[in-house]
Amino acid sequence: MPDKLWLGRFAAPTDKLVEDFTSSLDFDRRLYRQDIAGSQAHARMLAKQGILNPEEAAAIVQGLEEIRQEIEADEFIFDSSLEDIHMAIEARLIEKIGDTGRKLHTARSRNDQVALDVRLFLVAEVEGLIQDLTELRRAGARLARRHLNVIMPGYTHLQRAQPVLLAHHLLAYDEMWRRDQARLADSLPRLMVSPLGAAALAGTTFPIDPEFTAAQLGFPTVFRNSLDAVSDRDFILEFLAHAALIMVHLSRLSEELILWSTSEFAFVELPDAYATGSSIMPQKKNPDVPELIRGKCGRVTGHLMSLLMTVKGLPLAYNRDLQEDKEPLFDTVDTVRASVKLMAGLLGALTIRPARLTAAVHGGYLSATDMADYLVRKSVPFRTAHEQVGRTVRYAEFQGKELWELSLPEIQRFAPQAGPDLYDWLRPENVVARRTSPGGTAPTRVAEALRLVEQELILTEED
Ligand code: ARG
């Protein structure tokens, strides 16, 4: 077992319980690639600055390359007495190349090293998540395209309100996902700031070139204040906040899919591959995937809260508390990316039941607003029209009829200005078609909106 790398000051060994309690190796081993890339960039910078000689840097870079292969081949021994991935790799490097390996950590600290590793990790995940969201948006846009003219009830307070196009409803989610993507993209320049060179907290006495290290890693900028560089976890908090919001959006859609797949709504049928059966009730097909996405929203939101609390009250600069950033981050990345992918798959295979949607539009007086608008066009003041329609609806409800099932004389008892053209006016297709105001649900507007989204996602109508 290799020795700990900071033994010099210590006379007694670490308590085993303490070792277990403080070790992060079980989870931060996930950062091995970033750690190695960062160390290689650091070694090259040290050589360029004449702090190491070129042979030493080459040996370090090569040794680290071999360690990467060992880890990938599952040959690397992760020894938790070595605390974390940084120590584990450095100890192995020293084991492999001897004293030259002991030079790698010149002008560096684990404090700037770990901050760099997490940033490198997160950049790749954020880029991947932006792509996942593109796939999700594509699935949503395809579904909207396939059912472009299907009308469904639009709801407020979960009460049937006015008819809308299903495509319009789906495109509302596209707006959320588009903003989610924009937020993630906006965070990238703040993520791609290299903290390497801050060392433990105060900078270093060596003539380092942080810009050179950063450039090798594809980071356009470097830190401006060494204390901030090692203690800043805003970039993780920001990501967790964006992730929580993505989960909230997915959770809202999940809730709708769960409702819509009940026999009460029966607007959609979930694909078999995305549902499960009951162990006791043979008739059941449970919406487990949307339920779990909805459920996992709580978990991701919790991770955001957990790290906010961890960072709150921390004095500058690095504190070991910050090691608690990784598990919430890793779990969030895994959860949100899986949820986005699953929702994309689910939408791709979802069966819409247009007949049920149409039937729902024909019950519940969804055209009442339009009847009032109709009367206003016949010079009835809006408040009066509202009241007249209200009375008509009450009467119709009492009769167990829809508005268009009432005879004209019946209607005229409440709304004297109503004429025979009212019946056509109240048809849901016409109700929807009239909503041509910008961003409205008229088929012309929705087709326009969908085309824009498709262009953005580089989708053709056939996709
Ligand atoms: N495992 C530590 C973390 O994740 C790495 C930095 C440790 N630095 C230190 N001075 N103990 O935060």
Image (tube, rainbow, N blue to C red):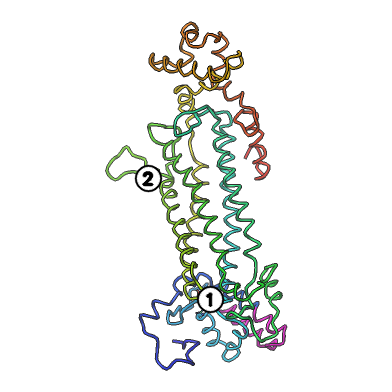
Residue, far top: 409
Amino acid residing under circle 2:
Thr
420 above or below 220? above
Residues packed near mark 2 inside 10 Å, few (<14), some (14 to 19) or many (20 plus):
some
**What secondary structure is marked by label 2?**
loop
Front position among marks 2 and 1: 1
In the rendered image, residue 51 lying in the magenta stretch gets the answer yes
In the rendered image, residue 367 lying in the magenta stretch gets the answer no
Region in magenta: 42-69
- Count how many numbered circles sit on residues in the image: 2
Q: How far across and down, in percent of the image, does residue 370 sit?
A: 55, 21
Would you say the beta carbon of the disc 1 residue lies within 8 angstroms of ligand 1?
Answer: yes
- In which quadrant of the rendered image does the C terminus lie? top right
Q: Quadrant of residue 191?
A: bottom right
Per the image, the residue denoted by label 1 is: 318
Q: Is residue 325 visible?
A: no
Amino acid residing under circle 1:
Tyr
Per the image, the residue denoted by label 2 is: 276
Residue at screen point 64% across, 84% down: 204
Residue at screen point 58% across, 57% down: 128
Residue, far left: 280
